[in-house]
Amino acid sequence: MRMEQTLILMKPDTIQKRLIGIVLSRFESLGLDIVAAKAVVTNRALWEQHYANLKGTPFVDSVIDFMMGNFNNLPDHRMYAFVLRGENAISKVRTVLGATNPEKAEPWTLRGQFGCIKNDVMQNAVHASGNAEDAAREIALWFKPEEILP
Ligand code: IDP
Ligand code: MG
């Protein structure tokens, strides 16, 4: 068992469907602590850094458009970001999150329940860090050290 931190972002489909509370509740139920939380107006430069690991893929630009809310007609480029902390937080969250493609996600997972049921891999409810290296990079990108509980 390892004490870990992971970055959570509520994707525009979750924001639009007003499911943030339910999603957060599922993470709290895992015994994880919310150690940072904020609402942010994002810009493309931030997303390009966040999705540095997707650079060069044919879909990175459309993922960024989607995350900026351009598909959902949200009133601004808002995003809700959280840091969760706990034993094996990264893998616990990924297990509850389910497969990237909601159509392939198990029905008890967040993506299985709240992702787009049609084969739209973009509308998959939540971003969560994939591994410890990504988590450290992503948390440093979205939060200043003093915004995270000690
Ligand atoms: P993850 O969110 O499960 O970690 P990643 O492979 O890191 O999945 O991809 C980041 C995001 O990019 C996914 O959540 C999904 O929204 C989008 N994505 C992944 N693969 C594709 C694809 O083949 N076409 C379009 N969008 C994709
Ligand atoms: Mg990923």
Image (cartoon, rainbow, N blue to C red):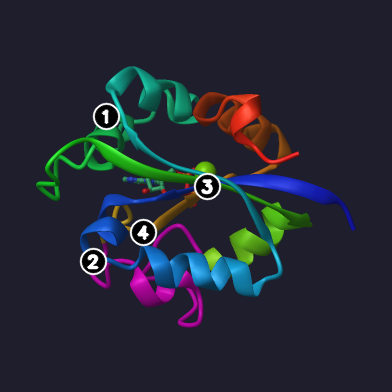
The quadrant where residue 129 appears = top right
Q: Could you say which disc has been placed on residue 93 in the image?
A: none
User: Which residue type does callout 3 highlight?
Assistant: Phe
Q: Position of residue 48 (x, y in %)?
A: 38, 22
| Residue annotated with mark 4 | 124
Q: Tell me: residue 120, above or below residue 47.
A: below
Q: Earlier in the sequence, mark 2 or mark 3?
A: 2
Task: Note whether ligand 1 is within 8 Å of mark 1.
Answer: no
Q: Earlier in the sequence, mark 4 or mark 1?
A: 1
The answer to whether mark 3 and mark 4 are in CB contact below 8 A is: no
The single residue placed furthest to the top in the displayed view is 45
Foreground label between 3 and 4: 3
Residues 101 and 71: in front is: 71
Q: Residues within 10 Å of mark 4 (few under 14, many from 20)?
A: many
| Residue annotated with mark 2 | 17
Report the Cα–Cα distance between label 1 and label 3. 24 Å
Report the Cα–Cα distance between label 2 and label 1. 23 Å
Q: Residues within 10 Å of mark 3 (few under 14, many from 20)?
A: many
| Residue annotated with mark 1 | 61
| Residue annotated with mark 3 | 82
- Provide the residue span drawn in magenta: 99-119
Q: Secondary structure at mark 2?
A: loop
Report the Cα–Cα distance between label 3 and label 4. 17 Å
Q: Position of residue 102 (x, y in %)?
A: 38, 66
User: Which residue type does callout 4 highlight?
Assistant: Asn
Q: Earlier in the sequence, mark 1 or mark 3?
A: 1
User: Which residue type does callout 1 highlight?
Assistant: Asp
